[in-house]
């Protein structure tokens, strides 16, 4: 019984540390938001200035978690998420480009 409890405590501890690491990594985007600001110029045609879309056809990117933006851009690039415009927009992006864009949009918290 003591061994079973120790095993559960280790599992809980591992899960807790993993969760804390994930939350900490979300706090800071890996990219350069100033570089992302320049790279985001074409994005803002549809997604609005700073990613604050007012058109319901285009999602708001401002203040979105960087990891989410990177995940979606990678899916568009890989073709696992389909959109005729976004697949083409994401195709030439490097991982660094995606990180920079994500850092820029995540940093836009104020209207």
Image (spheres, helix red, strand yellow):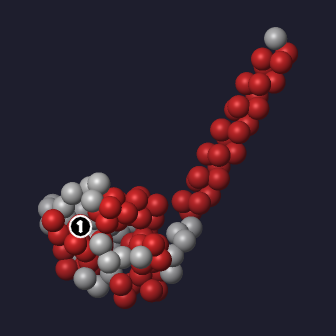
Of the pair 105 and 30, the residue shown nearer to us: 30
Q: Residue at x 52, y 69 (%)?
A: 29
> How far across and down, in percent of the image, does residue 56 sit?
15, 61
Q: Quadrant of the C terminus?
A: bottom left
At 19% across and 80% down in the image, what residue appears?
45
Residue that lies at the very extreme toward the top in this rendered image: 1
Mark yes or no: residue 74 visible.
yes
Location of residue 108 (image quadrant): bottom left
User: Is 5 displayed left or right of 22 in the figure?
Assistant: right
Task: Evaluate whether residue 109 shows in this view.
Answer: no
Query: Extreme right residue here?
Result: 2
Q: Classify mark 1: residues with Cα within 10 Å, few (<14), some (14-19) or many (20+).
A: some
Disc 1 target residue:
87
Q: Position of residue 30 (x, y in %)?
A: 54, 71
Q: Position of residue 20 (x, y in %)?
A: 65, 49
The residue shown at (24%, 62%) is: 59
Image point (71%, 39%), residue name: 14
4 on left or right of 51: right
List x then y, in percent, for residue 10. Answer: 76, 32
Looking at the image, residue 69 sits to the left or right of residue 45; the answer is right
Q: In the figure, is residue 24 to the left or right of 111?
A: right
From the image, which quarter does the N terminus lie in?
A: top right
Q: Quadrant of residue 105?
A: bottom left
SS assignment at label 1: helix
């Amino acid at each position: 019984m003591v061994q079973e409890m120790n095993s559960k405590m280790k599992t809980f501890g591992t899960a807790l540390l993993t969760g804390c690491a994930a939350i900490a990594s979300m706090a800071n985007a890996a990219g350069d938001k100033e570089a992302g600001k320049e790279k985001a110029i074409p994005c803002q045609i549809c997604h609005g200035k700073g990613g604050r879309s007012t058109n319901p056809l285009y999602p708001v990117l401002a203040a979105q978690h960087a990891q989410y933006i990177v995940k979606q851009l990678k899916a568009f690039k890989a073709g696992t998420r389909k959109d005729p415009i976004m697949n083409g927009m994401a195709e030439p992006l490097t991982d660094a480009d995606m990180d920079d864009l994500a850092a820029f949009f995540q940093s836009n918290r104020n209207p």
